[in-house]
């Protein structure tokens, strides 16, 4: 298999996993029952930041306020990615159609990223400076884990 094809597969799989993770994270936060109803990743994040009950309530309110829009965006992205996958897997390759579909997915992703940035700004307004710094440290740690996992996948393909 050509290296470019392996890279393309890796990117598509990575984006799909990221999209599912975000979708599940937003779905978990929308449940108003309690902190215990959140998925383990969000529980660890909340615990690691030392959020107060008041902060958790405020963050949930911000996410809930934007949830319908984020959910609609995510569902649209999933639908368009599935269409892209169908084009990629088709018997007859149609490069212009694939490129057009990639552009459509990219535009939708850009809109969702901008929305997430606005939500993030609101949430950072709820956090203390120490919590913001801790969140940055946690993000850097997670990014390093992802980098190591990606490196292992590339190593596997190189063998």
Image (cartoon, helix red, strand yellow):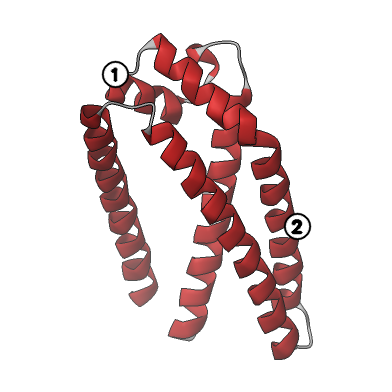
Q: Which residue is mark 1?
A: 50
The image position of residue 49, as x and y in percent, is 29, 25
What residue do we see at 53% from left, 59% from top?
Answer: 15
Q: Which residue is mark 2?
A: 79
Q: Which mark is residue 77?
A: none
The image position of residue 91, as x and y in percent, is 78, 83
Q: Quadrant of residue 155?
A: bottom left
What residue do we see at 53% from left, 43% from top?
Answer: 21
- Image height check: is 32 above or below 18? above
Q: Tell me the element at label 2.
A: helix
Q: Tell me the element at label 1.
A: loop
- Dot 2: few (<14), some (14–19), or many (≥20) neighbours within 10 Å? few
Q: Nearer the viewer, mark 1 or mark 2?
A: 1
What residue do we see at 69% from left, 71% from top?
Answer: 104
The image position of residue 28, as x and y in percent, is 58, 27
- Image height check: is 158 above or below 55? below
Location of the C terminus by quadrant is bottom left
Is 102 displayed left or right of 91 in the figure?
Answer: left
């Amino acid at each position: 298999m050509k290296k470019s094809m392996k890279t393309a597969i890796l990117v598509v799989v990575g984006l799909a996993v990221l999209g599912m993770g975000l979708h599940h994270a937003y779905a978990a936060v929308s449940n108003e029952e309690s902190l215990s109803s959140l998925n383990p990743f969000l529980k660890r994040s909340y615990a690691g930041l030392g959020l107060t009950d008041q902060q958790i309530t405020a963050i949930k309110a911000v996410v809930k306020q934007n949830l319908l829009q984020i959910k609609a965006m995510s569902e649209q992205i999933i639908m368009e990615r599935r269409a892209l996958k169908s084009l990629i897997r088709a018997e007859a390759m149609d490069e212009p159609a694939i490129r057009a579909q990639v552009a459509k997915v990219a535009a939708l992703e850009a809109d969702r990223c901008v929305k997430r940035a606005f939500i993030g700004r609101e949430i950072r307004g709820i956090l203390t400076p120490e919590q913001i710094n801790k969140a940055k440290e946690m993000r850097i740690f997670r990014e390093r884990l992802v980098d190591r996992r990606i490196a292992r996948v590339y190593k596997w393909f190189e063998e």
